[in-house]
Image (tube, rainbow, N blue to C red):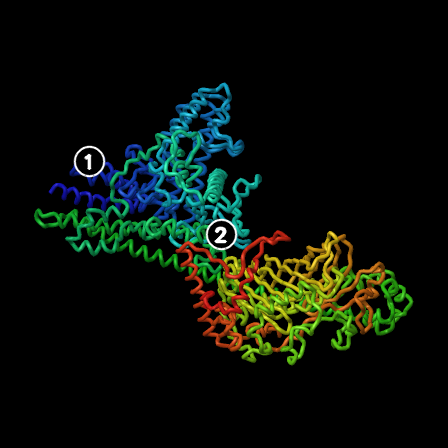
Amino acid sequence: MNEISSQLNASLFRLKLLDALRAGDESKVNSLIHHLKTVDSTVETSELIKLRETIVHYAVQVAPLQLIQALIENKDFDLDVNAQDSDGNTPLHLAVISSRFHVVKYLMGLPQINDTVLNDDRNQPVELAKDANIAQLMQYERAKFVERSATDLRQFFSQRDYDNLENLLVNNARASELLDINGADPETGNTVLHEFIRKEDLQMCEWILKHGGDPFKRDKRGKLPIDLVSSKADPIRKLLKNASKDQNMMDPTNTSGNVSAPGSTPTYKGYLRKWTNFASGYKLRYFVLDQYGILSYYTNQSDTNNACRGSLNLGFATLHLDSSEKLKFEIIGKNGIKWHLKANHPVETNRWVWTLQNAITISKDVIRRKTKLAPTRVSAESNIRPAQEDSYPIEEEKKKKLLHIPGRKRSHKKSPSQVSISSFTGSEADDNASLNSSDIHASVPKSPILQGNLPQINETRPSTSEFRLNIGAGDDDFDYDLEDSAYSDSGSINLDSSESRASNEQVAATKGSIIIEVVSLQQLFKALSSKTEDGVLEEETYSVGVRTLDNIRSLIESYHSSVQIREAKLLKKIERQQEVNKLWESSIRQLEDEIQRHEQTLAQYEGKKYKLRKLLESKGISAPQINNELASGLIDNRAAAELGATPGNNLESEGDSQLLNEFLYDSDEEFFDADDFDATGQEPQNESEHTSDTPLLVSETKDDKNESTGPESPEYLTKSQHAKSKIIQEEGSFLGYELPPRTKLSMDKDNRPKVGLWGIVKSMVGQDMTKMSLPVSFNECTSLLQRLAEDIEYNDLLTKAASIEDSTLRMVYVAAFAASEYSSTINRIAKPFNPLLGETFEYCRKDQGFRMISEQVSHHPPISACHAESAKWDYYGENAVKSQFRGRSFDFQHLGKMFCTIRPDSGVITKSGERAEEELYSWKKVNTSVVGIIIGNPTVDNYGVMEVCNHTTGDIVQVDLKQRGWKASSAYQLSGVVNDRDGNACWAIGGHWNSKIFGKKVTSDYNSKRRESLVDNSDGYSDPESGNKFLVWQVAPRPDVPFNLTSFAITLNDINEKLKPWLAPTDTRLRPDQRAMEDGRYDEASAEKNRVEEKQRSARRQRELKRESFDPQWFIKSTHPVTGDHYWHFNGTYWMKRKEKKLVGCGDIF
């Protein structure tokens, strides 16, 4: 009966205390506390004693800050701010959970606070922060404390002040947790043990070792402490050896309370600022370093229950520091991923840097030793750590034990209280017999303060092995920060920090008060139901119950009002942000329109300039003569009119003449003027009108009636050419290609649904295009594998090159071939289908004598490998693209390298003067950009310098594809000079990569004839050796078909009943979504696209569960024997399996 009365008294007292705390009634609170202090500790008063020991826990959740300060600073009350309740939570834990910023700030400023205490879920207060501002504040305050304590520690060591050292490292729980006696000095790289060994201070060395000093800690030069012992200091040497034995005898699995079993908790975690983009700058992110060396980051602490936003395997990473930056550092991972990170304080930076550097070192060691098995025992005799040599988890556990300084205890008593809500749902609340308390309890889950706001990581987070599977076993680094774009759920809405913080605090405090009041009332009713004296409610009990219900009603109204106000503010800011976004979009669109108008105006002036120059040159006036002719009045009236003047006007002045000369011949006029090449007098005639020695090549312009003929008319083949031709024929490469290629698509008109591109992609600025999910209506009916096949549309350039004896002239045609592939990109704005992993595409042309096979060998990053061959040439390489959407443009950077082998008819003279059968060329593709997206007029631009190198002869050419500028005449231009192995200029090339490319021999009088050749009006094409320009390549006419496909591209996705039985089941032609897209069945194409992509993801998950990796079927990653580049080598098995019809079981991806 007494126990029931005690519970009833405790419940009533708790409700009175909560009422007074929430009202901020300091006198009433003081009166209640004084009453509690008079209660003697007995079994009957245990509940009241628990309540007395957790007053601060209640206060930090519901009381005003001023009352909290008064209670803690009242020395008569002697309240412990680090006391733990039955859930292990301190007042700081609960203040953080309640998101009470100012309360947390006050508590962190108390000298006696300990922010390293772990609750029963093994979380420190900072790890429970849902508000990034609170987390940043706590980290900053901790960093300041560490800085002060580290300064004191250094001073105490230098003064050999053992008493203060003992107080700091042993008696101060917070300092002992945060300070590392084995930490290295950032400047010298030495630990204190290293320094005192150098000083031969035996007493201090002994003290350090007894207090957790690590005899195996190396300095920055890799020296162990024992390596620094002089020959005369035998006592120190003996001391270190004994300490080494003691350390080795430690059971690494019997660790302190700080360390849990391997694989269960991260080794380090906390908030850092991460650079996102120029628009957003640094943003606060929550980073987690697990014991397997995987560094991951999340939007915030509560987001750790979801998939991480990015991760790096530190075993493949490097750490970069800038001595001029005290807060910033970089981590560089695989595939060029780079994280720019920033801490809030130099001490915090140092802690992260040292932790990450150690993790990088250990992870690299683990990778090097991954094939070895860890020993089952640790030798107690050795002076080195076997665990460090063989097993990282054991080493990590031992490292944590060494960092645990003896004497460090979590001395703060866990006072079982009923502050955190899980206490209310404990043994007492489990009795659901009376007053329908089970109904009330069912609505209050265990620890609702935690679970209501912060997902419990330890309960819901997958195991370490599952986590490693989620990130590809740690091998693939990725960085996909969703909040970096405006597309994020968390939004780019930046609320006013103080205003939103106050609103959030009010909501959180009100919610916490409601929960506490409800559960307290529940316990009061429960205690009443057990009281069987007279069944009559006491007046005090009745009044407290009624008052509590009134408080709950008032709190609910306040909570509802606060939430409405917060939602209204959020909606208002969202609407304001939407208006700002619309304004920006409008402004950018106006700017784009203005830029386009300027470009058109410049193009008009450029055209007038060109016509004027041609007019003057047609009169026989050369550049040096123009000024004199102007002065002499030799320019006729029409020319003067073009200049805006009349005969005899003021153009005769020297200044005007000079101005005209500069206008006519400015600095941007190079040897190859694109306008001159495309002049009317220089238009190419029909091929039949040219003599046999004219090197004019036009592909895909032959009549359809010639398509089915053999590859070439009978001709002489060299030994190497004949061997290659024989292989192609014997392996049945052209089986299934008996019918001529098609010349049109199944539909005549592009009737795709019209969707605004800018409206879809404007929220994806900064993202990798390979990860952007666009509607299928933005696709064309080809894949990236087929786009790769379009590289060899003008393969007759290579065939022509093989017929030329001069290696430098061959280079002209190979360079033209490398540039010709870009002509098909004109007006091809639609996105090709991304190939599925393992998807293949074969393409053979009997009329042109070549065959080609390509395969998607990697999905992240996307890489396509290809290999094409004919009797006279081979073409192979990979298409690896780094893409990004930058707002105004889509940018593509080609990372892969292409190789070409030519087997010339007359052989090759190598750099060493020897004769060879074939020669090797290589080059990297230039950058591609799609501009004009905002104004709805997208245009493709290819630009950059493409260096084509002949590795056999030493010849080289740098083809400069000029970036599209202000002037229309600069669009699509290219130029270059072929140099032989001695660096001598032999040939010049120029023109437009979208229409024509010309060549010209560089002769001894090249400079003097430079302008003369440009204005030559002759209709014929001269011999290349004559020094006059000649046409190397001309683009084939493009038909009017959907998707703006070229004639060559139309043939790629063609399939017929003769070809279908010979195809691999992974061939692009059999892909259902792409086929539906070509036939105009867009809804079906969208559904099929989603289906095959989900099938691909499912296959990836299955491989991860089985810990299997994907291996391509037809290509092997290798190192090129000549250039040393990494490339994908064709294994040569595809065509024979095709001939034998053994491709049926080669994959099911569609």
Percent position (x, y) of residue 969? 72, 66
At 54% from the left and 79% from the top, the residue drawn is: 746
**Is 715 positioned to the left or the right of 499 in the image?**
right
Disc 1 vs disc 2: Cβ atoms closer than 8 Å? no
Please rate how many residues cluster around mark 2, counting C-alpha atoms within 10 Å: few if below 14, some from 14 to 19, many from 20.
many
Residue situated in front as seen by the camera: 907 or 1109: 907
Task: Name which residue type carries label 1.
Answer: Val
Task: Name which residue type carries label 2.
Answer: Asp
Q: Secondary structure at mark 2?
A: loop
Percent position (x, y) of residue 45? 18, 38
**Is 273 positioned to the left or the right of 58 in the image?**
right
Percent position (x, y) of residue 146? 44, 35
Residue at which label 2 appears:
477
Q: Secondary structure at mark 1?
A: loop
Q: Count the marks: how many? A: 2
Percent position (x, y) of residue 370? 45, 44
User: Which is nearer the N-term, disc 1 or disc 2?
Assistant: 1
Residue situated in front as seen by the camera: 27 or 157: 157
**Is 216 positioned to the left or the right of 803 in the image?**
left
Indicate the quadrant containing the N terminus: top left, top right, bottom left or bottom right. Answer: top left
Q: Based on the displayed image, in which of its 4 quarters is residue 143 positioned?
A: top left
Q: Based on the displayed image, in which of its 4 quarters is residue 393 positioned?
A: top left
Indicate the quadrant containing the C terminus: top left, top right, bottom left or bottom right. Answer: bottom left
Of the numbered discs in the image, which one, if any, rests on residue 64?
Answer: none
Residue at far left of view:
534
Please rate how many residues cluster around mark 1, counting C-alpha atoms within 10 Å: few if below 14, some from 14 to 19, many from 20.
few
Residue situated in front as seen by the camera: 1052 or 593: 1052
| 655 is higher (above) or lower (below) than 777 | above
| 714 is higher (above) or lower (below) than 301 | below
Residue at which label 1 appears:
39
| 102 is higher (above) or lower (below) than 906 | above
At 57% from the left and 68% from the top, the residue drawn is: 731
